[in-house]
Amino acid sequence: MGIETLKIRIKLFRDKKSSEIEYTYKKKFKDERPMVLDVLLQAQEEKIDDLSFRYGCRARNCGICTVDINGKPRLACRARVKEGDTISPLGTLPVIKDLIVKRDAIPRQMIGYNKIPYKNNLNVEADVSYHNLTACIECYACLDGCPLHKKNNLEVEENNAYLFGNPFSFLKLQRLYIDPLTPEEEKKGIIEKAKSLGLETYRREYQNLKIKCGVGINLKDEVIKPLLHAAFGNQIEKKRK
Ligand code: SF4
Ligand code: FES
C-alpha cells in the first residue's frame, strides 16, 4: 500500500504578487491528521525551501503562527488540515512575504498605556474576568469580522499605529481597566483611549457583532460589553432589521 497523501493549496505573496501552489503532503503514518504547521514544515523541506512563515511554541501559547485556512484565521500549530484546504496569510493584516504578516501597527496602538507603576503576575485580588483575559495569546484571529479594524488603512507608515481598534486592543484596555493595580485616576484615560480607537462603532454594531477569539475568550461579554458600559452606560443599540 502506498503512502497516504493530502493535496493542500498554499497561497503565497511575494514581490506584491500572489501565486498558488498545490502541495502534496505525505502522511507520516496511516491515520495522521496533520496540523497546518506540519504541512508548512514539510513543504519547506521538500518543495519550497525559502517558504516563509512564523511559529514559536507549537503549543498554542505564543500566538505567532496564525494563518487563514479557507479564509478563516486559525493557529497553524493547532488547526488540522484536510484534503483540498487552502492555506493563506492572515487576510486582516498586510503581507510581508509568503505567510508572514506585518503585526506591529496593532501593539503600537497601546503606546502610553503601560504606565501602571505596581505590577505582579499573580494579581490575586483581581476579578475572575481579569484572569480570563490574561489567556489572550496575541494571535490576532479576532481581527476577522471586526467592523472597526476593517476601516483601517493597513498601509500605515513605519512606526505608526492603526487608527481604529480591534477586539485585541480593547481586551488590553479592559484588562487594565479592571486591574486592581490600576489607579482610579488612570481609568478615565483608559476609557478615553477606547473611545479614540472607535469604541462607539461597537455600540452601534453590538447586536450583529461576529468576533471570535482563537482561544475561546468571550470577547463580547468580557471585553466589549463592559467597556461600552463604562464608556456610555447601558445604551447598546437594538439589533437592526
Ligand atoms: S483576543 Fe483571542 S483572538 Fe484576539 S488576539 Fe487575543 S487570543 Fe487571539
Ligand atoms: S506556534 Fe505558538 S501558538 Fe502556534
Image (cartoon, rainbow, N blue to C red):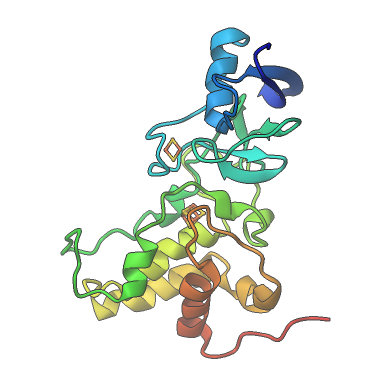
Q: Which residue: 55% across, 33% down?
A: 35
In this picture, is 210 found above or below 89?
A: below
Q: Is residue 239 above or below residue 148?
A: below
Q: Quick check: 84 left or right of 38?
A: right
Task: Please give left or right for residue 77 compared with residue 119 in the image.
Answer: right
Q: Looking at the picture, how far across and down is residue 198, in whole percent?
A: 58, 67
- The answer to whether 136 is drawn above or below residue 47 in the figure is below
Residue in the foreground of this view, choosing between 152 and 77? 77
| Image quarter hosting the C terminus | bottom right
Is residue 49 something one can see in this rendering? no
Q: In the figure, residue 182 lies in which quadrant?
A: bottom left
For this rendering, which residue is in front, 210 or 216?
216
- Identify the residue at the far bottom of this view: 234
Residue 225's spot in the image, x, y percent? Answer: 52, 78
User: Which percent across, then down, holds residue 54?
Assistant: 48, 29
Q: Is residue 62 left or right of residue 125?
A: right
Image quarter (top left, top right, bottom left or bottom right) of the N terminus: top right
